[in-house]
Image (tube, grey):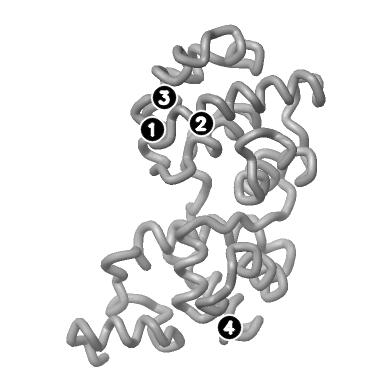
């Protein structure tokens, strides 16, 4: 397992590789961000952005999403996986925002997770990106990278991965580390073909060394 100093080093190296790492979901405000993150579950950011380009022109407030039949909203997001459930959750969270939060997106974990379709990962993204509150959202890229690097254990749950990262990184690094890890996992330490031979972290990555050896790289 990597210690705190090694973990910080890893994040700093990722930031050197991807100095402009950021949330790639296109949005103009926290409400659009919330909708985009809900849509992004088991879906690429690129596809979400393609759908929200027209979706956010049609719907701009929670009231807008409730003003149409569920079937119409389903049709608007049909190209996204799990669109039926996501459409139901979007209308549900829109109703909850109006009834409990005066139509505004709340800025606490507890309040956000009271919204239909919003779990801890979504709440963390909204807090971090939308409100600038330090948080680490653990998606498939963050989980994969941290386990490959042995920052976390293979058996750790998503919640345990988040807690481990929060222990090993200073609070002021949390939000940017989330983006650094995602970019590193999305564009370099990919699920099927990680670019181990050219990785600056190969010397401290046990799994990376295994991958590199399997591919005939002994450097």
Q: At 34% from the left edge and 87% from the top edge, which residue is drawn? A: 209
Given this view, does label 2 or label 4 mark the residue nearer the observer?
2
Which is nearer the N-term, disc 2 or disc 3?
3
Q: Report the mark closest to the observer, 4 or 3.
A: 3
Picture disc at residue 80? 1
- The residue that appears at 72% across and 73% down in the rendered structure is 167
Q: Is residue 117 left or right of residue 142?
A: right
Numbered disc 1: secondary structure: loop
Q: Are marks 1 and 2 in contact (CB under 8 Å)?
A: yes
How far apart are the two marked residues, 1 and 2, measured between alpha carbons? 9 Å
Residue 77 is labelled as 3
Disc 4/disc 3 C-alpha distance (Å): 42 Å
Alpha-carbon span between mark 2 and mark 3: 9 Å
Quick one: which residue is furthest to the top in this view?
67
Q: Nearer the viewer, residue 66 or 204?
A: 66
Q: Which mark is residue 6?
A: 4
Q: Which residue is mark 2?
A: 86
Q: Residues within 10 Å of mark 2 (few under 14, many from 20)?
A: many
- Badge 4: residue crowd in 10 Å (few <14, some 14–19, many ≥20): some
Which of marks 2 and 1 precedes in the sequence? Answer: 1
Q: CA distance from mark 1 to mark 3?
A: 6 Å
Is there CB contact under 8 Å for labels 2 and 3? yes
> Residue 110, position in %: x, y?
79, 44
Task: Tell me which numbered mark, 2 or 4, is placed earlier along the sequence.
Answer: 4
Q: Horizontal and vertical percent for residue 3?
A: 63, 85
The picture quadrant where one finds residue 49 is top left
């Amino acid at each position: 397992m990597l210690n705190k100093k090694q973990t910080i080093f890893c994040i700093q190296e990722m930031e050197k590789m991807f100095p402009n790492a950021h949330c790639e979901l296109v949005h103009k405000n926290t409400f659009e961000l919330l909708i985009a993150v809900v849509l992004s579950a088991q879906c690429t950011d690129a596809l979400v952005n393609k759908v929200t380009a027209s979706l956010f022109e049609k719907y701009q407030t929670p009231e807008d999403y409730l003003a149409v039949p569920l079937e119409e909203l389903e049709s608007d997001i049909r190209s996204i996986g799990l669109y039926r459930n996501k459409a139901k959750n979007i209308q549900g969270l829109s109703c909850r925002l109006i009834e409990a939060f005066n139509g505004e997106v709340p800025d606490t974990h507890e309040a956000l997770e009271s919204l239909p379709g919003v779990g801890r990962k979504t709440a963390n993204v909204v807090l971090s990106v939308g409100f600038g509150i330090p948080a680490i959202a653990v998606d498939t890229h963050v989980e994969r990278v941290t386990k490959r690097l042995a920052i976390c254990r293979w058996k750790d749950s998503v919640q345990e991965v988040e807690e481990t990262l929060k222990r090993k990184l200073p609070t002021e690094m949390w939000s940017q580390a989330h983006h650094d890890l995602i970019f590193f996992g999305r564009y370099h330490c990919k699920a099927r073909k990680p670019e181990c031979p050219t990785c600056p972290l190969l010397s401290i990555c046990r799994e990376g060394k295994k991958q590199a050896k399997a591919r005939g790289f002994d450097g």
